[in-house]
Image (spheres, rainbow, N blue to C red):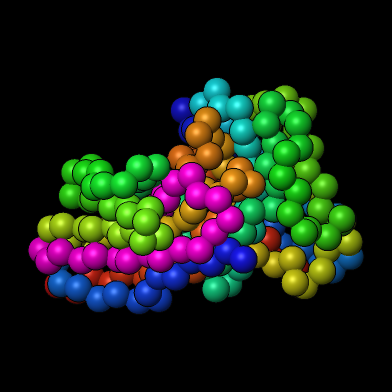
């Protein structure tokens, strides 16, 4: 029933590890996004996909690689995790850019 | 450059009315959105204004003046559950939503 879902909800890992976050939406939207929210609550877009095609790629380290197997799924793989990657990562989807539906978030802690 | 300005904190009492302002500077403007986020939760869409004027949805209203690069969110009949962070966000010509730093609203009994 959930519109936008993400797994896992929490991720605790050590520096240097590789991890993935998965996102799925059942709203039939064409566009999906990854956002990073830091400890000061600043929400910044990282990537956007429209119908499986990458359309926005912000200045993000290339250790971050998104993948969209189909328009309902958008995953985020992070290589060689660093302390500064600790944040909450939100997936979102939309049919209209101004009206976005967010997943519950994945709280990533790198130790 | 692109920037959004909104107050960092606002405090009000239950039953009151509060207005959260947002001014913006952006390359190309297509609309202003508002999102609510409770502690530990996800941002939730509240409203989107593409045209000048007031949009009302229940206790919440949102206003936009494109000529002044200004908008606000008006919350009426405040309830304790309205305590949350409120973000304005601008849709720009790059097809992105650029978020403000958020306004933390505290509603006191």
Does B56 appear above or below B82?
Answer: above
Q: Is residue B95 left or right of residue B56?
A: right
The magenta segment is B15-37
Q: Quadrant of the C terminus of chain B?
A: bottom left
Query: Residue B80: where, in percent of width, then height?
Result: 21, 63
The extreme front residue here reads B67
The residue closer to the viewer here, A72 or B1, is B1
* Residue at horizontal 40 percent and vertical 76 percent from the top: B8
Query: Residue B83: where, in percent of width, then height?
Result: 29, 65
Q: How many marks?
A: 0
Query: Is residue B56 visible to the viewer in this orientation of the structure?
Result: yes
User: What type of secondary structure mainly makes up the magenta span?
Assistant: strand
Q: Is residue B89 left or right of residue B86?
A: right
Query: Residue B56: where, in percent of width, then height?
Result: 21, 44
* Residue at horizontal 30 percent and vertical 66 percent from the top: B20
Q: Quadrant of the N terminus of chain B?
A: bottom right
Query: Is residue B86 visible to the viewer in this orientation of the structure?
Result: no
The residue closer to the viewer here, A100 or A3, is A100
Query: Residue B99: where, in percent of width, then height?
Result: 52, 59
* Residue at horizontal 49 percent and vertical 53 percent from the top: B90
Q: Is residue B26 magenta?
A: yes
* Residue at horizontal 42 percent and vertical 49 percent from the top: B33
Q: Is residue A48 left or right of residue B66?
A: right
Q: Is residue A17 magenta?
A: no
The residue closer to the viewer here, B31 or A90, is B31
**Rendering quarter of residue B47:** top left
């Amino acid at each position: 029933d959930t519109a936008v879902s993400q797994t896992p909800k929490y991720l605790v890992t050590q520096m240097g590890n590789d991890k993935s976050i998965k996102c799925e939406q059942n709203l039939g939207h064409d566009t999906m996004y990854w956002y990073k929210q830091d400890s000061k609550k600043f929400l910044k877009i990282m990537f956007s996909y429209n119908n499986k095609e990458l359309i926005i790629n912000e200045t993000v380290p290339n250790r971050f690689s998104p993948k969209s197997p189909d328009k309902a799924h958008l995953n985020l793989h992070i290589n060689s995790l660093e302390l500064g990657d600790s944040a909450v990562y939100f997936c979102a989807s939309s049919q209209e850019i101004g009206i976005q539906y967010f997943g519950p978030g994945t709280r990533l802690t790198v130790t | 450059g692109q920037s959004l300005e909104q107050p960092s904190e606002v405090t009000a009492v239950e039953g009151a009315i509060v207005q959260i302002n947002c001014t913006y500077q952006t390359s190309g403007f297509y609309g202003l959105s508002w999102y609510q986020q409770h502690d530990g939760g996800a941002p939730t869409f509240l409203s989107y204004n593409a045209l000048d004027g007031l949009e009302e949805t229940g206790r919440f209203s949102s206003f936009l003046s494109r000529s002044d690069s200004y908008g606000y969110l008006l919350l009426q009949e405040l309830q304790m559950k309205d305590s949350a962070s409120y973000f304005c966000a601008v849709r720009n010509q790059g097809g992105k939503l650029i978020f403000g730093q958020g306004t933390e609203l505290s509603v006191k009994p």
